[in-house]
Every structure is written in structure tokens, then in C-alpha cells.
Amino acid sequence: MPQNKPAETAGLETYGKDNFLKPHKMVITYDSRQALLTNDGSHETMYTSLFVETKTLIRSAFSAAQTITGEKLSLEKWDEVRSQRGVAFLYGSSIEADAFLSMLGASNIKLQGVKGIDAVKISTADDKLYILDNRTESCFAYSIPDTLTDLGYLLFRLEKGDADTGVFLSKIDPRQYGRNVIVPTWTQPNSIAVLEAVNEMRTPKDTIPDSIAALFNEEVSALSIIKNTEGTTIYTDREDQVVKLYSNGLFEYARYNIPGQAQSSVSVADAIDISTAFINRHFGFPKDTVLSEIIRTMQGDKYIIRYKYRNEGIPVVLDSASGAEAIEIEIAGGEVKRYKRVVRSVTQVLEAKEVMSSVEILDILLNKKITAFSGENIIAVNDLYIAYFERRFQDRINYIPVWVADVTVEKADSSMHQRMRYIINGETGIIMDK
Amino acid sequence: MLKKILVSTAIFAAIFASGSAVYAQADKAMAAQKDMPAYELIEDNLESKTFEKMQVISGSAREGTSFSLSLYWFKADNGKSIIAKKKETGSAAINGEWLHQDTAEWKVGPSGIFVQPVTLEIGKNKLVLNITDTAGNKAERVWEIELQEEAMVKEHINSYVFKDINKAIENPGQK
């Protein structure tokens, strides 16, 4: 199959794709306990140091040859390994091995046998890198040739710090909780501030901003502006490109006719490069953006790449009506076909809300009265984490602390299993969205 | 025909029985001894000596089971923690008293799990976990844990650091 070289390769230095390796959860294991390290203000330096050092060590495990064969182990081995001293990166969804290597800057390497990467762990106990691959239901082990002095030192510094202690719930009930469900435990009630935010992009009066004009291949004078009654502003070249700026802050770019090889395949590494360069050129990545998921067609001719961003280390989630993630890009035949983003700028920190513990939230979700009322019986909890959820009150946008539960439910009216996401108000325990 | 029905019945019975066995097995860990509350602890064997200030008591129990976790700290009779006295006495619990520090109480909800953190003090600590189920059956677990002092932590850290330095000396070409 022909492989297109990416047309968009400039601007990668603005926000390096290696940042997308930042995990959904960073877990530090000491001698007998785990800690969850978030990229918030007080831990940012330590988080960055650990991220860089861990990334370097992962890279060093793959430097010996182009085709790397790890020792294939059982999933149970992963359960042992996660209790060993070291650092683990847990990802919210499985990352294709080639995509992972591309973000690592090691596209020339092939990982024999690895299909997807759900988590990685550097164990200082045995100087090894472990990869959890749920797609092959395996764990792979690789030797690290480098010494672990720097990482060991960072762990010791962190050990005396105040990062939240974490507990893997699958240790308590492996039938109910997924392998990567780790929740923080607090000795004191935990408070998180509500934030006020504004749309990243404001609708200009009657001019076309340079940032929007730059998306078109035409001169600004050739573009038209249309405003509809719902407050949406539409910019178009009246041929094949359109930009819509909705009153709720949603930005959408679409290109209908992709010239040339629209049906030809593109490697996942090229798709990441195209996406990274395009977003860097057009509005950029918000601070602390991480990869959410990569979806591709079987033929490899189309990709949808989704990103989310975090505020003070806490991921921002949208309601189900606003789309899957804050930034989404669709690539077809090596070109950007669609680009969507809903990004806000935080303007003010409002009052802090005391957040319920993870067990209190699970007690609400698994209460039989609630499941009888909703007709959804939760049979597995795949993930549980704190996030900011966006609420709009007229022109005001607030970020409210919530718990997000990724669950598998069995519907009362059928025996079908379905993945669902529950958003639960962190302060009140009320289910706000699903 | 009769043979076929018998074989089918036997297979059905075997499948049904094996299913029950799975559930029975899963429940076995939590199955109460007579007059004892049903619960399971993850941290069943806490270390008697640790460098970790933060400990977590977690596990599962039937909904409605009540727990109380009390933390005591050992005050040696000269006012210092037992570590300071260990050279003199050679034994931890000879002279001194246990001082109550804190008690946390909770009831297990519909999730059937609990996670309770506890912060140890430098020196010798005692954790007393009382469990009472909805029928009023009671159980108690007690752990004595010594949180090692700073100098011992440093010694522990050095053992790791020196391991890496020794490795670097053995492999001078590496970082």
C-alpha cells in the first residue's frame, strides 16, 4: 500500500508529540505503598522530572536493535510488577504500539508481539521496563541497560513528599474493578476549587481574524462571513472549506474535497505528525494536553485523533452533548479533513468544594436502589478519577470538580453489556451526566 | 434415548454445580466463621517495621459492617519514643504506655469495600481494628508497627543509592 509522507511537518517544536506520552495516571510505588502524582502546581517540577526520566529510560530499553523482542509474561505478572518499587504510566485507553513509539521518537523500532500499550512500568527493583498489553492479554518485560540512579533519587525525594497515597481497587475485588483502577486516599477531607472560564475564541465583529484566515488556501478577500440567528458565525471560501464558530465556543473546521490520494493509507506515526503540526499551527495545544485516543479505519486511510487537556493536573471533561473530547482532528489520505475544539481559558478561581471519597462515590453508584431506578446494573468499574466538568449558566462557564466513572453496565431490559461514563458531582454525589 | 437424556442431565448438573462452586469459592474468603463477622483485609500482614509513614487499611465486608480503627503511640517512660530507648532496654514494650492518638469509624456501604488511610508517628505504633457486623458479631485485629526514624531511612536510601553507584563502577561505560 502506498504510504503518504506527511504534508504537515512544520511546527512540531511548539508542542512536542512526546508530551502525549504523559499518562492518564502516574503511579509511584515505594516499598509498600503507591502514590498518585498529578501535574498540579505544587508537584509540577517533580512530575516533569519523573516524566522526562521515565521517558528516557523507556527509550533506552529500545535502543539496542530495530526489532525488539520482550519476554512475554502473563497478566498476573503485571499484578506483581505494579507492587514493585518504580514508576508506572497508566493510560486511559490502549495506545497502538507504533503510535507509542512514534511519540517516543522511535518510529524505526518494532516491538515484537505488542499490539497495544495500556500501561508501562519502570521497576527499579529489577531494572526492567514492563508493558501491559490488554489486547494480547500479556505483559512484556525488557531489560534497561542504563543505571537507575536518577530515577532512584527522584523516588526517594518523592517518598518524603505529600503525593496522595493510592489504592488499586482490583486488589480488593478483581471481579468488579479493572486492573488500572487506582484511587487516591485522603487522611483529611479534600477540597478542590471551582473555576470560572471563558471561551478561548471570541466571535469578532465583521472582520476575519488572521488565525481563521490562515486555515484557508484563499486570500482573505475571497472569504465570506455568514451569521445565523443562533449566533453561529460561518467563514467559507464557498468551495470546499468552512469554519464555524458557535456561540458556545465550539470551533469547527471542515474541508470537503481532499485533493489527490484521499483513499491512500497513512501510517499512524504520520497521522500523529500531521495532527501535531496542524494543531501547533492553528491555535496550538493548551498547556498539559494529553492524547485521549486514536481511532483508525481498517484500511488505515482515515484517523480520528482526540486530545484532552488538564487544569492543575485535573482533566477537563465535556458533557455528552458537547462531543467526546476538547480537541478532535480527522485525517484522510494524509490531509486534515476536520478539526474541532472546545477549549476554555480559566479566568478566576472560585470557592473550594469538599470532594467525596472514591468509596463514597462507589457506594452511590452501586446502590441497588439507584440501579433499580436507572435500569442499569453496573457489573464492572473500568476507571474512576477526579475531573473538572463544564457547566454553563447563560454566559458564565464554570468548572466543577466531579468524579468520572467509566463502567460496564447490564441493561435491565436486555442482557446486553454497554460501556458508559458517569459524571458524578464531587461535592453532592448527584449523577450529572452519562 | 434414555441414555441421551441421562447424559444431558448429568452435563447440565455438572455445569450448574461448577457454577455454584465458583460462587461458593468467591464467597469463601468472606464466609464468616460462626459468630464472627465476614470481612477480608488486603493488608493482612502489615510489616512490623516500616519506613512508610502512611499506611492504608483496605478490604471488603458485607454492607452494614461497622469498623473502628484506633491508633496508639508508645511513649517510653522517659518521655522518648521506644527507638531512643532501644539500646537501654533491648525490648520494645517493657517500660512505657500506649497513648491514644486517633480513632476513625466507618460503615461499609453498597460497594462492599473500604479504604482507610492512617498516618503513623515515628516510633512504635499500635493499630486496633474493631469489626462488628449487622448481627452484632464482633472481631478485633491488632498490629504493632514501628515507624523507623530519619537516620534509619537515610541508611535505607543509601543502600539503594550505593547499589546504583556500585553498578556504575562495574559498568564505567554507562551513564
Image: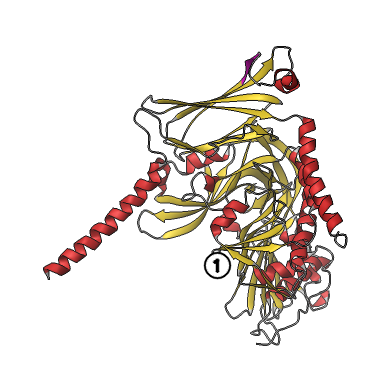
Q: Main secondary structure of the magenta part?
A: strand
Please say whether residue B100 is one of the residues in the magenta stretch.
yes
Residue at horizontal 71 percent and vertical 26 percent from the top: B122
Residue in the foreground of this view, choosing between A210 and A69: A69
Extreme left residue here? B2
Quadrant location, the N terminus of chain A = bottom right
Residue at horizontal 69 percent and vertical 82 percent from the top: A258
Give the image location of residue A179, x and y in percent.
55, 53
Query: Which contiguous range is marked in magenta?
Result: B96-101
User: Looking at the picture, does residue B18 appear above or below residue A4?
Assistant: above
Extreme top residue here? B77
Please say whether residue A214 is one of the residues in the magenta stretch.
no
User: Looking at the picture, does residue A206 appear above or below residue A39?
Assistant: below
The residue where tag 1 is placed is A136
Image quadrant assignment for residue B33: top left
Residue at horizontal 70 percent and vertical 87 percent from the top: A260
Q: How crowded is mark 1: few (under 14 residues within 10 Å), some or many (20 or more)?
A: some
Can residue A157 be seen here?
no
Q: What element carries label 1?
A: loop
